[in-house]
Image: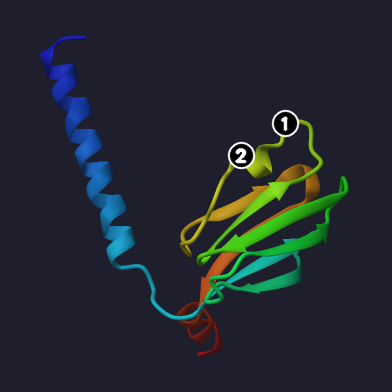
Amino acid sequence: MNKSDFKLIGIIVIVFLIIMLGFRLFEKKGEKVARVYYQNEMVLEIDLSDKSYREYNVNGYNGNVLIISENGKVRVKEEISPLHLCSKQGWIDSSYETIVCLPNKIIIKIETSQDLDAIVR
């Protein structure tokens, strides 16, 4: 790699960081809820304004999925799947993030009250 390659990589990284910062700055405000879907049907709604530690069990396609919420964040702690990719996705706390657990057919989305207002209108 020559000098111009490093400059190009640096510019791409800076542009990426600016875009990500913009997403965080202009993120929708309001009450956040995490919605858990199993086979495209909502099976659980978690209020993320509650900062305490909570555990939820959801039946997935391969078995039980343990979802935890704490400090306005949510994650999959344990699940039955070959590579445990669901639990490796980590915490999410933004409406731009989603946990998709294909082996168990579970999706966790974070939505704000502004998202819901836009749908109703």
Left-right relation of 103 to 26: right
Quadrant assignment, res 107: bottom right
Q: Which residue is mark 2?
A: 88
Asked which secondary structure carries label 1, the reply is loop
Residue 70 in the image: above or below residue 20: below
Tell me how the rendering is colored: rainbow
Q: Give me the residue at 77% from left, 51% from top.
A: 105
| Front one among 15 and 56 | 56
| Front one among 84 and 15 | 84
Mark 1–mark 2 CB contact (< 8 Å): yes
Within 10 Å of disc 1 (Cα), the crowding (few <14, some 14-19, many 20+) is: few
Residue 30 in the image: above or below residue 42: below
Give the residue type that dot 2 points to.
Lys
Residue 10 in the image: above or below residue 42: above
- Percent of width and height locating residue 66: 75, 54
Whole-Å distance between the Cαs marked 1 and 2? 9 Å
Q: Which residue is mark 1?
A: 83
- Percent of width and height locating residue 23: 33, 59
Asked which secondary structure carries label 2, the reply is helix
- Percent of width and height locating residue 49: 52, 76
Q: Give me the residue at 56% from left, 55% from top.
A: 98
Earlier-in-chain disc, 1 versus 2: 1
Q: Give me the residue at 77% from left, 45% from top.
A: 79
Quarter containing the N terminus: top left
Left-right relation of 89 to 2: right
